Image (cartoon, rainbow, N blue to C red):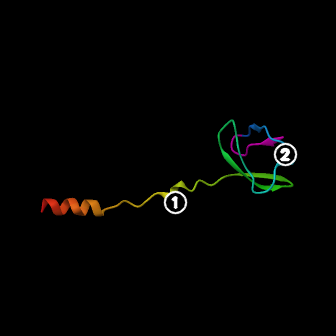
Amino acid sequence: MVICPVCDAEIDVEEDELEEADTLSCDECGADLHVVSVDPLDLEPVEDDDDDDEEAPDFEDEDEEDEKWK
């Protein structure tokens, strides 16, 4: 029996079919989980890297618009 570490729901997957570095999803809460260890089984939520992908605000466009008004 595999339990989601995020919502404690049972995940329908055979424990003996999992390998380290596998990823799976919880059907209940939708969390993506990473298999850290298989003996004992240890799952961790996959880190969301979207925050790192956000671009810094582009102020060049504002400068160009300011110059139009001068």
Quadrant including the C terminus: bottom left
Instruction: Pick out the residue farthest to the top.
Output: 28
Kindly identify the residue that appears in the image at 84 percent across and 45 percent down.
15
Q: Quadrant of residue 38?
A: bottom right
* Residue at image mark 2: 15
Other-residue count near label 2 (Cα within 10 Å), few / some / many at <14 / 14–19 / ≥20: few
In the picture, the disc for residue 8 is: none
**Looking at the image, residue 39 lies above or below residue 7:** below
Label 1 secondary element: helix
User: Is 22 on the left-hand or right-hand side of 50?
Assistant: right
- Magenta stretch, main secondary structure class: loop
Could you say which disc has been placed on residue 52 in the image?
A: 1
Q: Residue at 65% x, 38% y: name it.
A: 29
In the rendered image, the vertical position of residue 57 relative to residue 23, given as above or below:
below
Nearer the observer, 67 or 47: 67
Distance from disc 1 to disc 2, alpha carbons, whole Å, reads 33 Å
Q: Disc 1 residue type?
A: Asp
66 vs 5, left or right, is left
Left or right side of 57 for 36: right
Give the amino acid at mark 2. Answer: Glu
Which stretch did the figure color magenta? 1-7
